[in-house]
Every structure is written in structure tokens, then in C-alpha cells.
Amino acid sequence: MSWIEWYESLAKPSWTPSPATIGTIWQLLYPIIFITFGFVFWQAFRGKIPPAVVTPFAINLVANLAFTPIQFNLRNLPLATADILVVWATVLWCIVAIWPHYRWVAVLQIPYLIWVSIATVLQIGITWMNR
């Protein structure tokens, strides 16, 4: 069964956005993530911010990129839930870590935090409903 057939077959909360809506939201967020994370990594490379500030951004990037293969290739809902919790926690950590250095980067993480908060609640619900 394809990943979309598998996903459609799962029990989901009634308020679950369509896959197209989820994709559109990520299409809007990824450029913001790319620009802000790229800026942070560049500033760390230039020595403008301490390496510790980059840590949550690096962890977030890895966890964010790992979610889709975990969820749709492995089809492992509990592991995907653990992964998205890491994504959510590191978005908060990113905001706190970068705030003293570049507040505009922190502010631009707010839409990402809002979406990941919604996605985390959704993922927990899907995992619970399909246990």
C-alpha cells in the first residue's frame, strides 16, 4: 500500500487537515526555516554567535528531516511522535537561544512553533487512536 493509502487508512481526529493543506503549510514554512536557519549557521561559522546557540537549530533540522521517513517509510507512529516532540522542544529552544543575538530570527520561528504545536497534538492523537 502506498504511503498516502496507509495515511488515509489511519484513524485521525476529526479536525485533521488534508494532506494538501499540510503540504501547503510546509511549503510556506520551509523558506522561513531555510533563511533563518541558514543565517544562524552562517553567523556561527563567522564566529558572530557562540556554537551553543546553533545546537538547537542543528538538532531541530535533523529531527524535522527525520519525521517524514519515520512516519511514512517506517510507518512507526510512536517513533514519529517522539521525533515530533523533539522538533517541538527544539523550536522553543531555538527561540530562547537566538533571542539575545537576533530577535528577528526568534520572531520568525513563531509560525513554525504554532504549526509544530498543532502537528504535535495531531500526531499524538493519531498515534493514540491507532494503538
Image (spheres, rainbow, N blue to C red):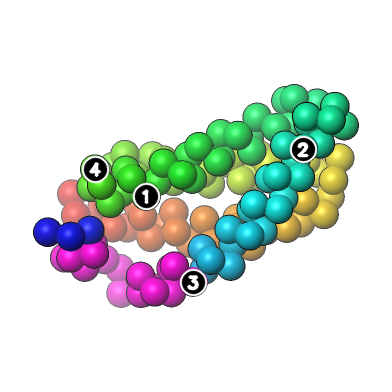
Q: Secondary structure at mark 4?
A: loop
Name the mark nearer the viewer: 3 or 2: 2
Name the mark nearer the viewer: 4 or 2: 2
Question: How busy is the neighbourhood of tag 1: few (under 14 within 10 Å), some, or many (20 plus)?
Answer: some
Q: Position of residue 120 (x, y in %)?
A: 44, 54
Q: Secondary structure at mark 1?
A: helix
**Residue position for label 3:** 24
**Residue position for label 2:** 42
Q: On the image, which quarter does residue 83 sit in?
A: top left
Magenta extent? 4-24
Q: Position of residue 40 (x, y in %)?
A: 75, 40
The reply to whether callout 1 and callout 2 are in contact (CB within 8 Å) is no
* Sequence-wise first label, 3 or 4: 3
- Does the segment drawn in magenta span residue 41? no
Q: CA distance from mark 1 to mark 2?
A: 26 Å
Q: Residue at x 64, y 38 (%)?
A: 57
Q: Nearer the viewer, residue 38 or 84?
A: 38
The reply to whether callout 3 and callout 4 are in contact (CB within 8 Å) is no
* Badge 1 amino acid: Thr
Q: CA distance from mark 3 to mark 4?
A: 23 Å
The reply to whether callout 1 and callout 3 are in contact (CB within 8 Å) is no
Question: How busy is the neighbourhood of tag 4: few (under 14 within 10 Å), some, or many (20 plus)?
Answer: few
Relative placement, left or right, of 100 versus 13 is right
Relative placement, left or right, of 88 versus 8 is right
* Badge 3 amino acid: Thr
Q: Residue at x 24, y 43 (%)?
A: 74
**Residue position for label 4:** 74
Q: Nearer the viewer, residue 74 or 129?
A: 74
Residue 68 image label:
1
* Sequence-wise first label, 3 or 2: 3
* Badge 4 amino acid: Leu
Q: Residue furthest left?
A: 1
